[in-house]
Amino acid sequence: MATIRKADSQARPPLWRDERILRIVGQVVAVVAVFLLLRWLIGNLLSNLERQNISTNFDFLSQPTNFSIRDANFDPRSSIWPDMFMVGVRNTAISAAVGIFFALIIGTLVGIGRLSSNWLVSKLSMLYVEAIRNIPPLVIIIFFGFALFTFGPFPAMNPTSPPWEWKLPGSDNNFAILSNDRWGIPAFVNTGRGSLGLFWLLLLVGVIAAVVVWVWRTRVNINTGRPHHRMLYSLLTLVGVGIVGFFLTSRPFGMSWPAVSESGRVIEGGFVTNSGYMALTAALALYTASHIAEIIRGSILAVPMGQTEASNALALSGFQRYRFVILPQAMRIAIPALINQFLNLTKNTSLATAVAYADVTALTQTAIGNGKPAVQMLIILMAIYLLFSFFWSVILNFVNRRFQLVGR
């Protein structure tokens, strides 16, 4: 026994050659180096700010912005926080959410198109992917801003060059107003009558009821094999509760139609958006879709060929094959990579300055240009983008865990 213990001790390498010890020492050295580097950078920054008599506190957040924000109900006397940042966060969130929605739809269709047996569809899809994803997103944004709006086909919005007005058939109301600077469409607005809070409460009940119906139809499909139609049943439940709640609360919403003002330069009523938002959202949606298309294509190819052969044996059509067999399995593979693309699109909204869209980055730059301290403003900006990334990561990782197959 003593001989065996002596042999083991002799076989063990010395500390300076022990792999486990070296890994621990390497990690400790890396952490200490990063800590010292950050300490030096922060100390250097604080000393330079103090030498130039620049404040390092956040008291300026309660000061007025002293500038207005395009197409926003914002007073220049409003404060930096929360007023200005809330407008920027809202604008960024709207652009990111709409861009992600269209990028996913376009990317999925183009990804399927790349695998099409139709030569023209396949080559056009390939041309789209190879052309768009190899162009910087900033260039695409600027192209949309100038080619589609500034020098595009739409008329300038002024008395001598009135915008295009599309009337609702059989009515004097405008269905859409288009110009090179602003677009207007109908929208629901608060009429001031009825109980708006009660309506939203009833709508929340409708959402819960729709989830219950979704679960019920899923169980019916599992237990009986009958088609679940859970999307249709859940949507009808939500719409039905919403309509009932609308009349029970004395119709708190009304339709607002867009109209050109007397000056001929402003759209009044309806939902109005500007060219900066449209150029940014369209460009980012198309750019991100080119990457999503490759993710979808690779995920479809990763589905075992036997699944396609089985669906063909069941005489499923091409749409049914993708709808019920291929895409549900491909999306399980694609979701982790899609999370990264959604995060990239959200962060790329910071390029909105190129088309004069008031996202949170553009407003932060404007505030810094008006004399607000840059370091503190950029710290808040970075924290906002971290929260955006955390929000999308939590939601999409939950979806990823929900759709992943569980091994037994």
Image: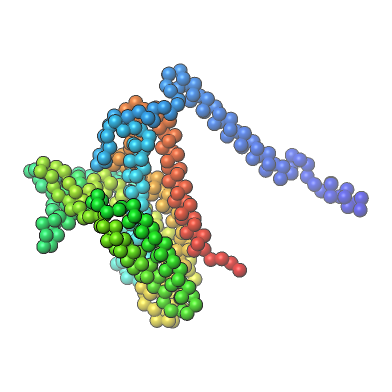
Quick check: 104 above or below 76?
Answer: below
Quick check: 98 above or below 235?
Answer: above
Whole-percent x, y for residue 232 in the image: 36, 70
Q: Out of 11 and 84, give the one closest to the viewer.
A: 84
Quick check: 124 above or below 367?
Answer: below
The reply, left or right, for residue 297 in relation to residue 262 is: right
Colouring scheme applied when the structure was drawn? rainbow
The residue at 49%/21% (across/down) is 47
Q: Out of 94 and 284, give the one closest to the viewer.
A: 94
Q: Do we see residue 300 in this rendering?
A: no
The residue at 11%/41% (across/down) is 263
Whole-percent x, y for residue 284 in the image: 33, 50
Q: Do we see residue 278 in this rendering?
A: yes
Place residue 252 in its image quadrant. bottom left
- Give the position of the C terminus as an image quadrant: bottom right
The residue at 20%/45% (across/down) is 181
